[in-house]
Image (cartoon, rainbow, N blue to C red):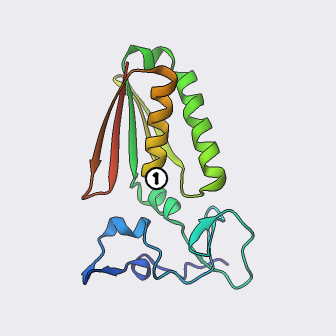
Amino acid sequence: MKQDVVSHTAIRTVRHGQPVGESHFYTSVESLETPVICSNCDAVFQNGRWQWSAAPIDSVFSHCPACARVKQKAPAGYVNLMGHFAHDHRNEMLSLIHHIEKREKASHPLKRIMWIEYQESGITVTTTDIQLTRDIADALLRAYKGDLDYHLNDTEERLYVRWFR
């Protein structure tokens, strides 16, 4: 039976004498015992990073930061696709977005799409990684032109991107 050995609070660290906030749980690796295997997706933390590899026998089980974000419904990024063009080309644009995720996730296990929501006003794609959010937005701009608005919320460590055409 798999057991979560590394808890949420065990991963929290102190920087500059201040406790790290909850959002740093997703990026903090200083206190992780290595190797760690994610009990949900089988990503392995060793040599200072999460990767897709065979888990060493002495691995402990925990959740990787991406699975923790999914479980806690705490996205790192939002890409909102707005406008008639997004509505008319939804399948084509989502195909591009999934291609970007697949390419990035192959070498970076923490870069994932969490969910995609469809509203009358457009489509919202949520991600587990700020850089994946940026990569998706940049790919949309290159492929379809349009306008991008970025807003980085430093307090929550979240990136909000609005693409419009």
Residue 139: x and y in percent read: 51, 32
Horizontal side, residue 23 vs residue 37: left or right: left
Measured as percent of width and height from the top left, residue 31 is found at: 46, 82
Q: Is residue 120 above or below residue 157?
A: above
Which residue shows up at 39% across the image and 79% down it? Answer: 9
Image quarter in which the C terminus is found: top left
Q: Quadrant of residue 56?
A: bottom right
Amino acid identity at mark 1 = Asp
Number of residues whose C-alpha sits closer than 10 Å to that of mark 1, classed few (under 14), some (14–19) or many (20 or more): many
Residue behind mark 1: 129
Q: Is residue 95 above or below residue 40?
A: above
Q: Residue 14, how many percent across, how many down?
A: 32, 81
Left or right for 115, reference 162? right
Residue drawn at the location 39% of the way across and 21% of the way down: 146
Q: Residue at left 48%, top 20%? A: 144
Name the residue rendered at 63%, 79% in the picture: 35
Which quarter of the figure is the N terminus placed in? bottom right
Say which of 47 and 122 sits in front.
47
Residue located farthest toward the front when viewing the structure as drawn: 142
How many marks the image carries: the answer is 1
Q: Position of residue 7 (x, y in %)?
A: 46, 79
Q: Please, what secondary structure does the residue beneath circle 1 have? A: loop
Q: Is residue 119 left or right of residue 101?
A: left
